[in-house]
Amino acid sequence: MNTFGNIYRLTSFGESHGPGIGGVIDGCPPGIELDMEFIQRELSRRKPGQSRITTPRKEDDEVQFLSGIYEGKTTGTPIGFIVWNKNQHSSDYENLKTVYRPSHADYTYQMKYGIRDPRGGGRSSARETIARCVAGAIAKLILRQYGIQIQAYTSQVGSIKLAGSYKDYDLSRTEENPVRCPDPEKAAEMEKLIAEMKGKGDTIGGIITCVAKGVPVGLGEPVFGKLHAALGHAMLTINAVKGFEYGDGFDAALYRGSERNDRFFNDNGHINVRTNHSGGIQGGISNGQDIYFRVAFKSVATILMDQETVNMQGEDTILKARGRHDSCVLPRAVPIVEAMTAMTILDYLLLQKTR
Amino acid sequence: MNTFGNIYRLTSFGESHGPGIGGVIDGCPPGIELDMEFIQRELSRRKPGQSRITTPRKEDDEVQFLSGIYEGKTTGTPIGFIVWNKNQHSSDYENLKTVYRPSHADYTYQMKYGIRDPRGGGRSSARETIARCVAGAIAKLILRQYGIQIQAYTSQVGSIKLAGSYKDYDLSRTEENPVRCPDPEKAAEMEKLIAEMKGKGDTIGGIITCVAKGVPVGLGEPVFGKLHAALGHAMLTINAVKGFEYGDGFDAALYRGSERNDRFFNDNGHINVRTNHSGGIQGGISNGQDIYFRVAFKSVATILMDQETVNMQGEDTILKARGRHDSCVLPRAVPIVEAMTAMTILDYLLLQKTR
Amino acid sequence: MNTFGNIYRLTSFGESHGPGIGGVIDGCPPGIELDMEFIQRELSRRKPGQSRITTPRKEDDEVQFLSGIYEGKTTGTPIGFIVWNKNQHSSDYENLKTVYRPSHADYTYQMKYGIRDPRGGGRSSARETIARCVAGAIAKLILRQYGIQIQAYTSQVGSIKLAGSYKDYDLSRTEENPVRCPDPEKAAEMEKLIAEMKGKGDTIGGIITCVAKGVPVGLGEPVFGKLHAALGHAMLTINAVKGFEYGDGFDAALYRGSERNDRFFNDNGHINVRTNHSGGIQGGISNGQDIYFRVAFKSVATILMDQETVNMQGEDTILKARGRHDSCVLPRAVPIVEAMTAMTILDYLLLQKTR
Amino acid sequence: MNTFGNIYRLTSFGESHGPGIGGVIDGCPPGIELDMEFIQRELSRRKPGQSRITTPRKEDDEVQFLSGIYEGKTTGTPIGFIVWNKNQHSSDYENLKTVYRPSHADYTYQMKYGIRDPRGGGRSSARETIARCVAGAIAKLILRQYGIQIQAYTSQVGSIKLAGSYKDYDLSRTEENPVRCPDPEKAAEMEKLIAEMKGKGDTIGGIITCVAKGVPVGLGEPVFGKLHAALGHAMLTINAVKGFEYGDGFDAALYRGSERNDRFFNDNGHINVRTNHSGGIQGGISNGQDIYFRVAFKSVATILMDQETVNMQGEDTILKARGRHDSCVLPRAVPIVEAMTAMTILDYLLLQKTR
């Protein structure tokens, strides 16, 4: 199942060490001026080697469009694109051909399909998300015309976390540091922790918070296409994601209706709410308030330490991982979270036009 | 979007105070013997009025099958069914026609569709989940043939929570108390808290944990149909759900790869794992271990207290809610969580047959 | 696969001799005033027993709506409905339990599913089309608001055929005779032929022509959702249909480009075409001209004559059919062709709004 | 809508004069050995410049696979591929930028999307079918393992037609002549007619017949996924197709049930039929007999003669077409008909596994 979306649909393909990663965007509205620099910039936000805390792999990820564009504008026909793989070191993975890496997808892919491409994790590699970033960048360009803005940031790495809500930070400062955290002090702590992990060959998890502003009231398709269910699904398809919560999220379990209901009031002639515990969505439909949610990422499974595991024959063995890997995916996952959010909101915005 | 699933598909319909709630199950394998008592029992697990802590509404929910069954067995043709609404007190909702209830879907439905059925919340009522319980019960019957068992339970109400993992409890005791919590002592505390809320006309949230045992390795369809993404989507479509996490979930943020990787080992000739932090799913594909996840529910929005709100004209008003409502949805949501889990796993099990 | 459509979706259920035939319409725009008399009238156009040439079965087909409507208007939530089966004589089919009727679906259903409901053909009965007529009637009500009108008629029964194109007849006279043919003289001949078939216990095939007027330019979704492909698919799902052609259809094989290209010209300031061999669709997209097409129906498989066949054990036997059957489906298939056309055009009209 | 299929799904992209034509095949079973020579040969069957009666455009269509294959076998992950466009003469189309060609898709694309790529017809070019041939070739490789064979041939060009059914010809001789007609004499006549058309700058239509042998009983998904409806839909998505009929097709209108019912009989212990007027499908489900159908193609719209038309301003003008075009698409459409048939049958074969 490599197609995402109902109207604005991305079908993606590609393995980590194959010729490239690409996709086809179908259902994109016609006449959209494509800001190629913006798209490339979005793509570069997820690329490796951006800073000393990300993997030193140099992936010069450049998107080549193959169709659906004429004189710089979308034509309404499918947009094919590819980012060619370069600088892949498949030999790094030679020893993985017959070994199942702990907490990786090697074993399950082998069991499901009876065959797998072991080079760099094949299809299970997070390099797959390149296609999402391209489709997400185009979605962002379209959403911008509707005044919708999406901003994600790293809110937790290990036990270092931002205490406040997204409203307590100047999100425009997110890109100022390599961990993409809007609080410079916490960012420095996180960066230090990640560097420490890197030094040990270990990895660490974290949480990304995302906010969508300007989403009009009315998006979402009850009962199985509730907007938060679509967003949750989108986030959970991202590599290493273990949880999703929106509005009060898991904390909602703790509170009473009398404490957490979002009371309506007449705000100078407009209906407004006193609080936004709902996270901008009620009954699965956007209510015009900020939509915010949090996404939990586990630590990267590849650690540069010896690990007990088995080979394809089921024999016990010790895995000595090599390769160039991230010690923490959070910084590079921020644009991916945004991309999936943008695609989802655009998709439901287009669906709402059928009403 | 009222259809759920890819192969085993439920299309549901119905409003709280209309003629009934029903659905059509398409893609159900033929030749399945339908244990009508089991189906009815599953349906009764979610019905109101089961105990003193649930709403006193007496909904005598009986399913009537309309098609797809011959001599007690499924025929492979669509299974239509309906549960007629009885005992509805629409007059209780007369005053809601022009008022938007805080944290309810009244406002968003009105804005989205320009019209809404105000009686009992209409389509946004949790009564809609009846259809899911019916389709889920049939899914369970089929999964049983594959040795797959699904068990959910209330693990938290307000701040009263079970300290251990699902392995620390005898889940067969879940149905022994009205809150559906396998720990009798905690169950008693939860029951007391819910009763207290009820006395005050207030409500409280909580968390449901669900475990699926016996799921074979290989289910899940990367990259957009990862099994946990499908489960998360399924859970997030349930009324009042605010969050989903599987395996280590949000806690995964805190740990290092070296601490939480699930190491493989040769277990008397079979490949096994020393731990199951992954929650039975790796790379979006089941690995044969127990699948477990947690679902967060907010407190019910309807409280029997005066609340500030606005009417359809946007004027400030005070809502004096009446009606018969749950003070905590958790006990009745347990079978719904199980139903959505069963449908999802069956759907992916059938998809896997196309390999 | 019992769901039809992308945005305006019908999911249908029901067998000939089960409790009833029904469906769920999802994606219907909200706020549509439902003219219940019109819907019932459309349904009555397909019911048996309308005239001496149709089956004498008296099916008092009345639709009961189950959801999605509030104060006479659609609410945007799914519209469930059912037409209860009455007056079924299942005993007529007792002898069919173990016999495969020639050119019927008994054998293929048994082979596919390993089980079948033999009463009245079960799901393979044309009684299933009731659901289509209901969903089609609502689609027509919506299309009417866009000035789109759909009219089908019987253009051939056996070798008796209308010589001219749809433009040569006053289509408003279609309902004046029981065969639904706008040419009264040909209609009389057709009626006589059908009566003759009936007298012999035999059956006869024919062709229905359909015209959609007022379809705006721009509907259709290349390359796999070309409008004529969607219409062709829709028609081919109707029982007994063997062929579909639009515009010049099979005759197009005979002609040269220089003879049949539809030349554009400036028609008092508007772009128009001199001819419409294309049938209102070019490149899979409507061009604003009349859309017309023809649908071929085979003779009804059930004949009241002794027929050689086999039983479920594969033994040769003689089938002595009983029951009350049509000698020609054409007259009653006219509203079904219209219903499927209406649903298809509405669906693509809604899709076009996402551009 | 550029995705075809339910389980075995092709998403295609590409314009005639863009970088290339490609696609993504999702849901392909893993472990399939890809015979690259076979795939390339299938692709070459549709390429221009094969003989003196096809367009002299030299399109050296070579497929490059981008993903989903490891050591020559499919891995179950999406198979991306591209055929790069070469030898395109976009300047030939410079004059078409502002002119609507009669019976082409220029006008409808412009009206639908508000923008179009005028070079070579853009997305509406039949060059798009390259992607279908690639996906169809892989489908054929898989079907071969099930003993299913698909063979199409040109059965009519203009008024020159084969009198007999597919059983009257040695279909293995189809590829012996450039028109792909198994009757050498008729083939010669057809070739002469096409050459004559070419000499005049005119074009001619025709009919392709297709037969699928070895399809097991049980494929097809009533009521909206009837096998013939899926095949009809598939055929009608091919450029220039105007009609589809299967089994007796439009002729079925002429006959009586007593004449055309396919009687079952015990054929040495197996259930067989005396005739196959049904075309191998009953009730929308394959019955194990040969599936055969016919597809009508109109004459190519591009003729090298002056034609009356309008420009984008709606002004009358004369179109003087240039470029290198086919005078008859039939010979090159034969592999496309086969490809769409193969994809459809494989898709339904995989669907049937979910029963």
Image (cartoon, coloured by chain):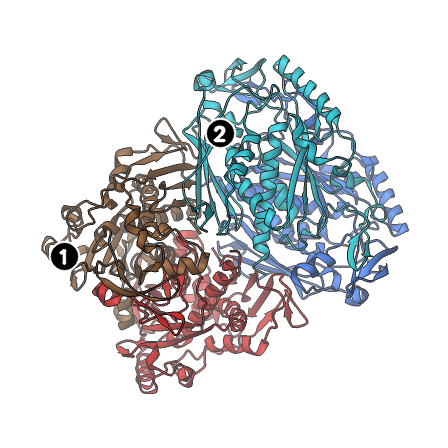
Chain colours: A cyan, B blue, C red, D brown
As helix, strand or loop, the secondary structure at mark 2 comes to loop
Q: In which chain is the residue bearing label 2?
A: A
A191 left or right of B225 in image: right
Choose between A27 and C52: the one closer to the eye: A27
Identified at 78% across, 41% down, the residue is: A253
Residue D190: numbered disc: none
Indicate the secondary structure of the residue bearing disc 1. Answer: helix
> Which residue type does callout 2 highlight?
Asp
Image side of residue B260 versus residue C164, left or right = right
Chain name for mark 1: D
Asked whether the beta carbons under mark 1 and mark 2 sit within 8 Å of each other, the answer is no
Identify whether C125 is placed above or below D182.
below
Residue B236, position in %: x, y?
Answer: 66, 45
Q: Is B41 in front, or is C132?
A: C132
Is A283 placed above or below C321 here?
above
User: Could you tell me if residue B216 is visible in this image?
Assistant: no
- At x 57%, y 58%, the residue is A353
Q: Is residue B211 above or below residue C261?
A: above
Q: Which mark is residue D199?
A: 1
Q: Which numbered disc covers residue A61?
A: 2
Depth order, front residue of D204/B47: D204
Packing grade of label 1 (10 A; few <14, some 14-19, many >=20) is: few
Residue B303 spot, x, y in % from top left: 84, 53
Q: Residue at x 87, y 43 (%)?
A: B192
Q: Position of residue D179 (x, y in %)?
A: 17, 52
Asked if residue C335 can be seen in this view, the reply is: yes
**Badge 2 density bin: few <14, some 14–19, many ≥20, Cα 10 Å:** many
* Structural distance between the alpha carbons of marks 1 and 2: 51 Å
Q: Mark 1 is on which residue type?
A: Gly
